[in-house]
Amino acid sequence: MPEVIGVRFKDVGKIYYFDPAGLPVRKDDFVIVETARGIECGQVAMPVRSLAEDPSQPLKPLIRVATPEDLKKVEENRQKETSAFEICVKKIAEHRLDMKLVDVEYTFDNSKILFYFTADGRVDFRELVKDLASVFRTRIELRQIGVRDEAKMLGGLGVCGRPFCCSTFLSGFQPVSIKMAKEQGLSLNPVKISGTCGRLMCCLKYEQDAYSELLRTMPKVNAIVMTPQGKGVVIDQNLLTGMLTVRLDKARDAAPQVFHAKQIKLIKDAQIQVGRDEMEKFKSLEKN
């Protein structure tokens, strides 16, 4: 079984596996490794452990544990990134490009500078790349990202008053859909179900498994049921308390009655569906 270490290159980024090459490495140590982008400095998020299966591709070996000189260079790169950001913003304005610069990254060995930006559509930045290359005299890469990635990079506070989940502990984005909000009984109001990034809140995913299980065992809205007071149709449900509001067939004009799910026998269940008009209305909220 091969031994590996897990390395992160961002505070809440994806973990990549590397061969420790027999070097003594502990969690939170900074290490120098070779990546697809070049030589990088990352932090050990997972100490040495054995994998149950061989990786699909050979692992790159660890080059060395970061020295004080390496860490000093990382700090120097951070200062360079601040300067490069300001220069790029000016160049974008000069070229009159409809794009927003979000972040700048130097690779550890300064072989490449990555500029992350957002834009509503495709941007022809070829002249900008040439201009930046003439200034920095190294490889330039402009990478367009989505608004979720922008929120992850910049950070901030969510509507709950806590720091963004994506910038504190989520290493990747999970698919979130309007159907989840509907199944959880939330108001389909974009202001209430979208995050600061303008997309559906990531936290809709957290309790979805529990709601899916409850929906599997409880009659849904519009289901036909038999109650202690006769046959009726479910017009509302509270999945967490197990209470159902039913309009009885024998008294359609009377006030609906409330029953616990255990008091009710299901005759014909209904389906939770997102209508075409709802899909079109909230389509933009599901994008990355």
Image (cartoon, rainbow, N blue to C red):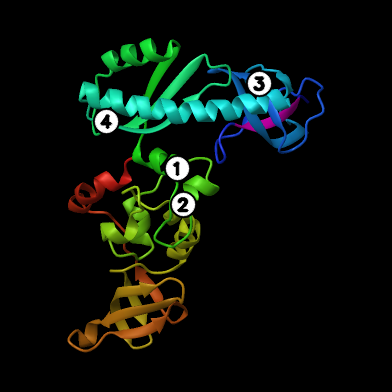
Q: Earlier in the sequence, mark 4 or mark 2?
A: 4
Above/below status of 108 relative to 228: above
Labelled disc at residue 99: 4
Q: Residue at left 35%, top 52%?
A: 196
Relative to 210, 23 lies left or right: right
Q: Earlier in the sequence, mark 3 or mark 2?
A: 3
Instruction: State the image quarter where residue 22 is shown.
Output: top right
Q: Position of residue 121 (x, y in %)?
A: 23, 30
Residue contact between numbered discs 2 and 1, judged by CB atoms under 8 Å: yes
Relative to 232, 277 lies left or right: left
The amino acid type of the residue labelled 3 equals Val
Residue under label 3: 33
Q: CA distance from mark 1 to mark 3?
A: 24 Å
The amino acid type of the residue labelled 2 equals Phe
Q: Secondary structure at mark 3?
A: strand
Q: Secondary structure at mark 4?
A: loop
Residue contact between numbered discs 4 and 1, judged by CB atoms under 8 Å: no
Residue under label 1: 152
Task: Indicate the quadrant containing the N terminus: top left, top right, bottom left or bottom right.
Answer: top right
Which residue range is magenta in the image? 3-8
Q: Earlier in the sequence, mark 3 or mark 4?
A: 3
Residue under label 2: 164
Within 10 Å of disc 1 (Cα), the crowding (few <14, some 14-19, many 20+) is many
